[in-house]
Amino acid sequence: MDNLRVYLERLQATQTNPLLLVGEAPGFKGCKYTGIPFSSGQLFRSSPHPFIHSIRDQLDIRVRESENTATMVWEYLLDKPVVPLFWNAFPYHPHRPGERLTNRAPNKKEVEQGGHFLRVLHDLFEPTVVVGVGRKGLECARSVFPDQSIRYIRHPSFGGKAEFIQGMDDLLRSTTEPVR
């Protein structure tokens, strides 16, 4: 999917050593269709974020559903001096058998498989900080980078928005170099 290529190329062209935020897996309303972690078709249609706006016309978005996590994350980032490199512990959409419009957490084998892609992305972008967003993201990042300090931020879904915001605020306060 060219959408992911557009996102990664734009991020690489505009940032040096970005923050790497590792989520769980693509959701059935968002990344499954866009190919870009922590995003949705509706986000690319309506977000005023400058980064989103800069790639909007280059994307092929056919499903325009809204996805709560994507909305919360990019609303938070709107006035922040950072656009993180987003990735998922498992880069494919895991769902219940026979029910493609469901989400399930990736299993241990899937998280291990996803580690290969995370390592490649890490080598390409050389992030200054790696953050697990949610337990699966943390688990994957720690297993791939056992000698690196991995930060943890609560995933914003299922009532975690306030803790996510606090975690991001703490993270951005602790990083010394702006990444925009």
Image: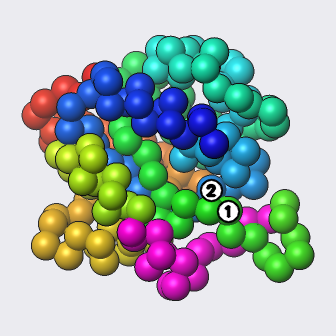
CA distance for labels 2 and 1: 5 Å
Residue 82 sits in quarter: top left
Q: Which kind of residue does numbered mark 2 sit on?
A: Pro
- x and y percent of residue 31 in the render? 64, 47
Q: Which kind of residue does numbered mark 1 sit on?
A: His
Q: What is the secondary structure assignment of the residue under circle 2?
A: loop
Magenta stretch, residue numbers: 102-116
Colour convention: rainbow
Q: Say if the magenta span includes residue 105.
A: yes
Q: Quadrant of the N terminus?
A: top right
What residue sits 50% from the left and 37% below the top? 5
Rendered position, 47 above or below 175: above
Q: On the image, numbered disc 2 is attached to which residue?
A: 26
Q: Nearer the viewer, residue 165 or 86?
A: 86
- x and y percent of residue 23 in the render? 48, 57
Residue 122 sits in quarter: bottom left
Left or right, 133 with respect to 95, comes to: left
What residue sits 37% from the left and 41% below the top? 85
- x and y percent of residue 94 in the render? 68, 69
What residue sits 62% from the left and 62% below the top? 92
Q: Between disc 2 and disc 1, whose residue precedes? A: 2
Left or right, 107 with respect to 120, comes to: right
Rendered position, 81 above or below 151: above
Rendered position, 47 above or below 152: above
- Magenta region, mostly helix, strand or loop? helix
Q: Quadrant of the C terminus?
A: top left
- x and y percent of residue 25 in the render? 58, 61
Q: Nearer the viewer, residue 35 or 75?
A: 35
